[in-house]
Amino acid sequence: MTFATIMLALGVVLVFEGLGPLLIPNKWKQVLASISEQTPQSLQRLGGALVTVGIVLIFIFL
C-alpha cells in the first residue's frame, strides 16, 4: 500500500463524511445530538462495528 493509496482512501472518507453536513445540515445536527446522548458503551460498540465493517471491506476490495 503506497502513500498515494492511503491519501486517496482518506480523501474518499472525507468526501463521504462531508456529505451529511453539506446536504442535510439540520438533520445532521439532530443525528449528532442523538449520538452525544448515547452511553460510552454504546458508542464503543458502534465504533467497533464500524471498524470491523471497514476492515472487512478493505480485505474484500484490496
Image: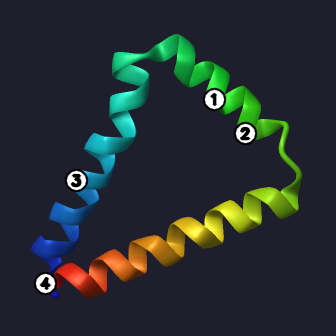
- Tell me the SS state at disc 1: helix
Q: Residue at x 32, y 75 (%)?
A: 57
Amino acid type at image mark 2: Ile
Precedes in sequence: disc 2 or disc 3: 3
Q: Earlier in the sequence, mark 4 or mark 2?
A: 4
- Local SS, label 4: loop
Work out how far the residue at label 1 is from the one at label 4, CA to CA, in angstroms. 35 Å
Alpha carbon separation for disc pair 4 and 3: 14 Å
11 or 27: which is nearer to us?
27
Seen as rendered, the residue at the extreme top is 26
**Discs 3, 1 touching: Cβ within 8 Å:** no
User: Along the polypeptide, which appears first: circle 3 or circle 1?
Assistant: 3
What number is the disc on residue 2?
4
Give the quarter of the figure containing the N terminus: bottom left
Q: Is the residue marked by circle 1 packed among few (<14), some (14-19), or many (20+) residues within 10 Å?
A: few
Name the quadrant containing residue 21: top left
Q: What residue is disc 2 on? A: 35
**Three-letter residue code for mark 4:** Thr
Q: Secondary structure at mark 2?
A: helix
Q: Nearer the viewer, mark 1 or mark 4?
A: 1
Q: Residues within 10 Å of mark 2 (few under 14, many from 20)?
A: few
First of labels 4, 3 by sequence position: 4
Does 1 appear above or below 30?
below
In this figure, which residue is indicated by the disc labeled 3? 11
Q: Spatial distance from mark 2 to mark 1, Cα to Cα?
A: 6 Å
Q: Residue at x 73, y 39 (%)?
A: 35
Q: Which residue is painted at 53% across and 65% down in the image?
A: 50
Tell me the CA gap for discs 4 and 2.
34 Å
